[in-house]
Amino acid sequence: MNIQGLHSIIQELVIKPHTSIAALKRHKYFKAAKRGNMANALTLATDLLKLDKITMAKDAILVPVLAIEASGRNAIPLAMAKVISDYSHTAYSTDIIQDSKAFHTGAKAIDRLMHPVAFSGPVKQNAKYIIIDDVATSGSTLISLRNYIEDNGGHVIAAIALAVASHKITGTGAQLSITDDTVKSLLSKFGEEIVTFVANELGYETLYQLSNSQGRYLLSFGSINSIRKKISSHLGSQIGEETRYLNDREKADLRQWAAQIRSLSTTSLSGPSTSNLLFHCSACGECCRRIGNAIDSAKNKAFHGNALNAIDKALVDFPYPIRTDGSCSKLNNITNECTVYDQRPDVCSVKKTFQMMQQDGLIHKDVPEALYMGITGTLCNQWQEESGTDKSYRVKEVYDA
């Protein structure tokens, strides 16, 4: 086998991690971002990406792994692409998606090897691509994305992940593409049979379609027959757990969900450094879903000739249509985001409602703003509990003015 000839057409991919897996999982928005909350994912990506250490090619296209995982739609790779794009003025694509529900997060090495994930979507011929995921464990997902893009006429020039895993057998996920040394070791140990085995029984056209961790995993076996036995015993324990593929509706929904991030700004994220709120808004959407009731109450007061305070007047004059369920028409029900956030009415700003209430004498002028924010956060959590909202959305922090 002409190793150098094969390797010369494949770009070596090495990942420089931005944080550790432990630190990533400790981030307050990790779980919510993993379940698809884009606002939380953008905050997480902004907090953890070391943008000054990323070298970008201006003509490259960023491609995040867009997948439905066991916990939901993972918004972290998408948010990473958005943040990097806004920082570097580089294009990103939401057209290429993961077709299969392989649920590789937490999967064993044999699972990742036997069930490579599938992708679909348009690839620009001869275009340069940079692929993105939140974590590289064995590198199986990113390498499958690389293979898909390369097989369809694109060129993957780099890979980005927030964190990488490391194992004594498979090595570090930072070395994404398989090295010549690993290929030589496979050929030396198993002979040309390993090439046939990988192609016919695992579905990889060449050894260079494996990640380096996958190659090292194969090297941990004494023979090809022992690999077969491992696969056979694993298949026997995994009856009924075949890889599932998205139907056309699920693919369309995933692409539509991913496209929503284009309407969000990385300069108006929830949190103390980027929002006018003094508590961390978790983007649960509860206040936006209840605005119709507040408007009806204010209009009822006006109808009966009752005096209206500044907030009542703002509600009566609310500029956007209300849906039949009482939610604001500008609430994106997929992302929980306000689609007119930068132009939202004053009544939708906690800080400005505090000012209106003080001006009307509804709140004493000596009441500190931070106290009002704390009360608002408590009310927010009560609404979430009433609606059965996941606990990861609870407002946990209050910041002094």
Image (cartoon, rainbow, N blue to C red):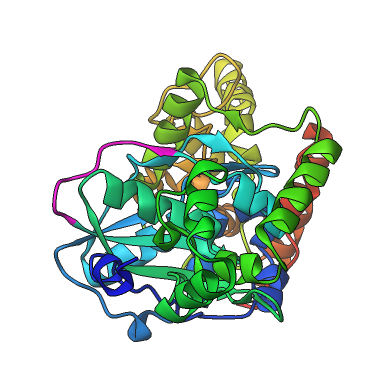
For this rendering, which residue is in front, 313 or 113? Answer: 113
Residue at the image point whose x is 75% and y is 57% from the top: 226
In the picture, measured across the screen, residue 378 lies left or right of residue 49, that is right
Residue 303 picture location, percent across and down? 56, 16
Do we see residue 273 in this rendering?
A: no
Do we see residue 116 in this rendering?
A: yes
Figure disc tally: 0
Split into 4 quadrants, where in the image is the C terminus?
bottom right
Residue at the image point whose x is 55% and y is 67% from the top: 215
Split into 4 quadrants, where in the image is the N terminus?
bottom left
Range covered by the magenta-colored residues: 119-127
For this rendering, which residue is in front, 220 or 148? Answer: 220
Residue 120 colored magenta? yes
Residue 148 picture location, percent across and down? 36, 46
In the picture, measured across the screen, residue 303 lies left or right of residue 319, that is right
For this rendering, which residue is in front, 370 or 378? Answer: 378
The dominant secondary structure in magenta is loop
Residue 315 picture location, percent across and down? 51, 33
Quick one: which residue is furthest to the right in this view? Answer: 237
Residue 86 colored magenta? no
Which of the 4 image quarters holds residue 233? top right
Which of the 4 image quarters holds residue 300? top right
Whether residue 164 is situated above or below residue 262 in the rendered picture: below
Residue at the image point whose x is 29% and y is 65% from the top: 6
Quick one: which residue is furthest to the bottom in this view? Answer: 53
Residue at the image point whose x is 76% and y is 58% from the top: 375
Residue 154 picture location, percent across and down? 22, 52
